[in-house]
DNA sequence: GGGCGGCGATACCTTCCCGGTATTGATCCG
DNA sequence: CGGATCAATACCGGGAAGGTATCGCCGCCC
């Protein structure tokens, strides 16, 4: 199977419309129809149910859509990482580390300092982004290594090492009655009047339905909390980033959050290996 | 980048010889030279250092070799899984579960029984193989789900759920002096006269250098132990498979072994999801 | 040291596949 | 029933992939 065929199929499967898919691909519709038909013949499998008015995925088609996206990602990552390796031989051109803006600054600073002190350390570019983007950046080869937070982030497809585990706190507007408590439980905060828990975007960028404001990053969230429009359950270490308008109370039964350092398998970079080794020694 | 180009490059990078690579690919040498050159131009990166007598990988080339193999695996897996989905719509054609021949039979039997009792269960084919093959089978789309054992198996690239954790025992010929002990430490057994620890094959099928017999599976290993030619450190559950000639003693400081159920990300099969859910409920 | 052999690159040709335009055929809608 | 929409088919042209022949370079060996 050629990547061209995969790209064509993914486009059609996403659009469910040969004309629009062809437009998106920058080709005419007839060659696209032919390519898909040929792909189906070679696979010996019907991928699309077409009437002359509508296109739908078959069971096999939806498998190929999911698997094909992953395969295309892998090819793209191979290409991008090769380009980067050529520009920055032996990892000497700097690592890109991606992490959430809300992540523990101390842990990150500690890691960067310790790594910089290693012999043979290379410059590290830190890229901050929203929760959903890290995975994509790492998967596509735009970043070398990431700090992820389980259970929020999926670590499937990466090598990981655990760095730290911490409990969670609820962040509330200063002066809220609950801030007088030494601790709370999840049940105490799931239905606070006027302070709903926010909604985070799914990996595809859409928001699940339900109440609560839509947020894209942690700064937005804290802003909303300060405005008295939401409350937030966050890792303890976020306390360092709270200012006067905000207060935090430990949530005893919230799941622990584990910070892991993640990197793509097949990484041949000694710089990544050094950074990971430094990170695990910090514990 | 097209998979054809990737296949060509991987062949050359593995052979380090254009002629042999071309032969392996079933094409003539000149088109291969051209294809590689064109790939290098498009990537803007030198992949191979060639003199007229020798071919060597550049830094970027070795990155592309590793990443390209993974990408080709992903494409191949997409193809294979699509074919299987077409033959067996809605996962109705049976799941393939792959595990080591040495794995705990009780856990597996329990899992298969519990899953078979689920509504909507499909037949499960159990595939037993040596330790190194499981990963490949799962990655290539020949199997749907695997039971792996950390820390021996790498789970990178898969979704996993932990099923069980157990200590390890040392397996010795019956009557060996150490069998009188209630427990031992690693230091007690690393240098037993005449009973070396065996060597397992690397993922590429070769054996690391060093003393100790080469083994390919657990049955071979137990055979060697019974013959008094080796000793073995294995998970406790292997005791169920020991016969009269063999004895087991707990090793206090050996790393715990975790049995996990692993499946490829992007799996769209409800049957896999059901099986995993059943497994996690067993604990 | 000169001829030989191995190996990758180049030149040139052929073929086939990809893509474009024009058209047909089917189905939904008014 | 006629128009609109959308996928499939027919047909053609260009470019890319593959093959053969050959060159150029460099170790090797007598």
Image: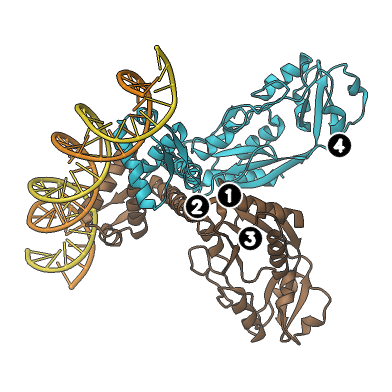
Chain colours: A brown, B cyan, C orange, D yellow
Do labels 2 and 1 touch, CB within 8 Å? yes
Tag shown at residue A269 = 1
The numbered mark 3 sits on a residue in which chain?
A: A
Do labels 1 and 4 touch, CB within 8 Å? no
Does dot 3 land on a helix, a strand or a loop? strand
Residue beneath label 4, please? Answer: B252
Tag shown at residue B270 = none
Does dot 1 land on a helix, a strand or a loop? loop
Nearer the observer, disc 1 or disc 4?
Answer: 1
**Which residue is at 91% across, 19% downward?**
B177
The numbered mark 4 sits on a residue in which chain?
A: B
Q: Are marks 3 and 4 on the same chain?
A: no
Nearer the observer, disc 1 or disc 3?
Answer: 1
Nearer the observer, disc 2 or disc 4?
Answer: 2
Q: Does residue A72 appear left or right of residue B114 in this picture?
A: left
Residue B219 can be seen, yes or no = yes
**Viewer-closest of B175 and B42:** B42
Q: Are marks 3 and 2 on the same chain?
A: yes
Q: Give the class, few, some or many, for how many residues have Cα within 10 Å of label 2's Cα (few <14, many ≥20).
A: many
Does dot 2 land on a helix, a strand or a loop? helix
Residue beneath label 2, please? Answer: A85
> Which corner quadrant holds the C terminus of chain B?
top right
Looking at the picture, does residue C24 appear above or below residue B86? below
**Which residue is at 49% across, 67% downward?**
A205
Residue beneath label 3, please? Answer: A148
Query: What's the distance in space between the residues labelled 1 and 3, CA to CA?
Result: 20 Å
Do labels 3 and 4 touch, CB within 8 Å? no
Q: Earlier in the sequence, mark 3 or mark 2?
A: 2
The numbered mark 1 sits on a residue in which chain?
A: A
Q: Give the class, few, some or many, for how many residues have Cα within 10 Å of label 3's Cα (few <14, many ≥20).
A: many
Looking at the picture, does residue D27 appear above or below residue D29? below
């Amino acid at each position: 199977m050629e990547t061209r065929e995969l790209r064509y199929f993914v486009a059609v499967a996403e659009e469910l419309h040969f004309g629009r898919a062809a437009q998106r691909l920058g080709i005419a519709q007839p060659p696209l129809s032919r390519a898909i038909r040929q792909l189906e013949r070679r696979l010996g499998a019907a991928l699309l149910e077409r009437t002359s008015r509508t296109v739908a995925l078959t069971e096999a088609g939806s498998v190929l859509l999911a698997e094909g996206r992953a395969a295309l990602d892998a090819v793209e990552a191979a290409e991008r990482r090769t380009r980067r390796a050529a520009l920055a031989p032996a990892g000497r051109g700097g690592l890109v580390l991606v992490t959430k803006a809300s992540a523990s600054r101390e842990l990150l600073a500690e890691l960067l300092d310790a790594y910089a002190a290693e012999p043979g350390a290379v410059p590290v570019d830190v890229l901050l982004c929203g929760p959903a983007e890290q995975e994509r950046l790492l998967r596509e080869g735009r970043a070398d290594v990431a700090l992820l937070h389980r259970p929020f982030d999926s670590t499937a497809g990466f090598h990981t090492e655990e760095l730290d585990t911490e409990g969670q706190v609820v962040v509330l507007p200063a002066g809220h009655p609950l801030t007088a408590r030494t601790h709370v439980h999840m049940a105490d905060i799931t239905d606070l009047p006027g302070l709903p828990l926010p909604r985070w975007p799914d990996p595809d960028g859409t928001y699940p339905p339900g109440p609560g404001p839509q947020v894209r990053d942690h700064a937005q969230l804290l802003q909303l909390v300060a405005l008295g429009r939401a409350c937030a359950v966050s890792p303890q270490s976020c306390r360092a980033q709270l200012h006067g308008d905000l207060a935090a109370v430990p949530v005893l039964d919230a799941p622990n959050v584990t910070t892991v350092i993640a990197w793509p398998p097949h990484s041949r970079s000694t710089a990544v290996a050094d950074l990971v080794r430094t990170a695990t020694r910090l514990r």
